Amino acid sequence: MSGIPMYKAEPYYKLDDLNNIELPKCMYKMKNLHKEQSDGPKSAQRGPKPNRKHKADSSATNKKIMYVAELTWTKTMTVPLMSSSGSGALEALEQRQENILRDLDALQAEVAAMMQHLPASVKQQASGTAAGATCGQAQLEGPVRDIVINTNPSSPPLSLFILYELLKQQFRCFGSVHVHSSVENVPEGLCKCLGNGIRSDLRNRTDFQLAITLIWKDVKPSPQMMMSAAYQTPVHGESNVARYLGRILQPSYDSLDPVTATEIDTWVDMASTQVLLGNNKERAASLRSLNSRLGKHDWLVGSGLTLADIVMWSALHQTGQAAGVPANVKRWMLACNDQPAFQSALKLTQS
């Protein structure tokens, strides 16, 4: 069937030129970013470089970048980078030591300048701390250490009063007593149990090293001790409070003689679990063990008064067993009563 064509298009390629068509080798071209800028017009006249030359230029540029980065890092360091040889390492170490000594001298000068603006009481406290450390005494460094103890007046922790008297012999202590609204009719002796004859309005609080605040309060278990106002983590139980205060008295309590420390903790645990909180059968068994131990020794542990004697003496008085103890225990209790630190606690038991 023949007809009239709608349109006629000229051929794009002539059939005779098909063998001469040049196909494109890439989609598009980009400017060579790795070309050396210092070459100037010469490099522009060269045109595209061969593939091998391009790789060489790229490697050289990367080396320059690494060198500049290394040089920049070197300038920012306090100690310049030295060679890996022995002399270079030694010089770097010497330079670092000189920089450290220079910084320490600057810090010492700043501390000396700050000390000029401190109150006289703080300066005296700092000098006393340094002198005590030289003599090997127990020290409380830094600001005053505040300890708050909540306890029930129905069962006063007598070991606290004994330890407070011992603490006053080594530290500048401040004690205060308060009565919570949850308790009534607290004896006058308990309200003045930590009185040291120093009024808080006559002395600066920073003059003291240790401040113990006792609050008579209806708390269970009793007592409860707070050592940090920031964390508000209480320590429960008279034995644990005594352990904490005992380690203030003797910081080397655990490290000096671990065997002795373990024996002391054993008697403290017995006083807490069997004498204070135990039933009649457990209390009788603890008294037999106590009487057997004191039949061969003057004190519970070692040749002198320890934390074990203080806590056990307190437990026997709080449970009303001090009057009917065996002969060896009675002799030991009389020896405890002769100690000056026990006198204030003994008065509270008689009031």
Image (cartoon, rainbow, N blue to C red):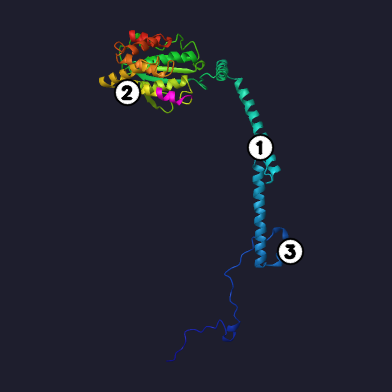
Q: Which residue is mark 3?
A: 42
For residue 175, which quarter of the picture?
Answer: top left
- The image position of residue 166, as x and y in percent, is 45, 14
Q: Is residue 86 left or right of residue 135?
A: right
Q: Nearer the viewer, mark 1 or mark 2?
A: 2
Tell me if residue 172 comes above or below residue 84 in the rendering. above
The amino acid beneath tag 3 is Lys
Residue 262 colored magenta? yes
Instruction: Please provide the residue range marked out in magenta.
Output: 256-263
The amino acid beneath tag 1 is Arg
Q: Are marks 3 and 2 in contact (CB under 8 Å)?
A: no
The numbered mark, 3 or 2, whose residue comes first in the sequence reads: 3
Q: Which residue is mark 1?
A: 96
* SS at circle 2: helix
- The image position of residue 207, as x and y in percent, is 51, 15
Q: Are marks 3 and 1 in contact (CB under 8 Å)?
A: no
Q: Residue furthest front?
A: 296
Tell me if residue 350 comes above or below residue 226 in the rendering. above
